[in-house]
Amino acid sequence: MQSVLITGSNGFIGRHLVETLKKQQIKVIEFSRSIGKEATRKTDWQNLPKVDVVFHLASVSGYKGCNADTYLAYKTNIDGTANALEYCRRIKAKLVFPSTYVYDTPYTDYKKETDPEKPTTHYAMTKWLGEELCRFYSRIFKVNTLILRTGNVYGPGQSNIYLVPIIAAHLKNQQTLSLPQPDIERSFIYIDDLVKAYTALAQTATGPAEIFNVSYPQPTTIAKLIQTIETLTGKTLKVKYSGIGRPNEINLNRMDISKLKQRLGWQPQISLEEGLRQYLKLKEF
């Protein structure tokens, strides 16, 4: 892999990926709204240089973002993916497509990549439809695509609309935080681990539209996450739980990463406690 194009290059994951790849002396073509490029605009894909790999990160992400404007979510996450796939088809590049948890019940199981799928939110549905496009382009047009079902990433530079930054901000400002339920589980993965997995998989020979779970192997409840942050900062957060979850959102998010371990010998190196320590240090607690 000598050259890449990264859509959403100015986003949280994109910025870290750009920095890492440039340090590895890989040529990076940035593609983001901040430089006037829209993944949904077909003309913006014209006259681009040929690259080896496309990381298609541009999307409307998360439960809130997709529910706030469902039209924009489906347009961005589907049309943008179709344009990225057409570009890869034209130049014969590999497409790396980050997805999310799209699995069916029972949610108590640690899900493998071969388990049945059944998206329950707009965000998960847009990502699953993107996966379907990847499978279609791989099957019909022989485009080399790679699907990465990713856990909840966190780390320096993440927007305050996500859980870890929200908790940190409320704790620092001594504000009461309203949350749905303390026993909701998420699999948090530190940004450095995520980027290492993405770059390693991009350079690995993979099958047509092959799927990998990329996550931290042990999920953490919201209550435990808050407790860990409190221990690291020596501060106590005021939390008010409503007891009511968000509609259609899955409370348990458990992914089996054994396939990734077996294929690459990879697993996250940064524990939740260590990742939070690094993140909070930059927040000057």
Image (spheres, rainbow, N blue to C red):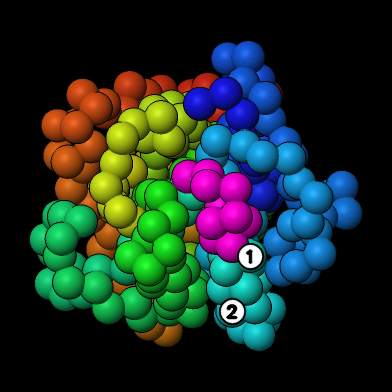
The crowd level at tag 2 (other Cα within 10 Å; few <14, some 14-19, many 20+) is: many
In magenta segment, residue 204: no
Quarter of the image holding residue 141?
A: bottom left
Residue displayed at 23% across by 37% down: 260
Is residue 120 at all visible to an observer of this figure?
yes
Provide residue 166's location: percent of width, then percent of height. 60, 51
| Residue 245 appears anywhere in the view | no
Kindly identify the residue that appears in the image at 34 percent across and 77 percent down. Answer: 119
Between disc 2 and disc 1, the foreground one is 1
Residue 91, magenta (yes or no):
yes
- Label 1 packing within 10 angstroms: few (<14), some (14-19), many (20+): some
- Quarter of the rendering occupied by the C terminus: top right
Residue 272 lies left or right of residue 275; in this view the side is: left
Estimate the x, y position of residue 16 in percent, counting from the top left: 61, 31
The residue type indicated by label 2 comes to Tyr
Q: Residue at x 74, y 57 (%)?
A: 45
Kindly identify the residue that appears in the image at 46 percent across and 30 percent down.
199
Instruction: Name the residue nearer the viewer: 173 or 283.
Output: 283
Total numbered circles: 2
Would you name the residue on which mark 2 appears? 74
Which residue is more in the foreground, 66 or 43? 43
Badge 2 marks a residue whose secondary structure is helix
Query: Residue 117: x percent and y percent?
Result: 24, 73
Mark sitting earlier along the chain (2/1): 2
In the rendering, at what x and y percent does residue 124 appear? Answer: 42, 71
**Which range of residues does the magenta coloring cover?**
84-94
Residue 83, numbered label: 1
Residue sitting nearer the eye, 113 or 54: 54
- Compute the Cα span from label 2 to label 1: 14 Å
Q: Identify the main secondary structure in magenta.
A: helix
Left or right relative to 94: residue 21 = right
181 or 22, nearer to the observer = 22
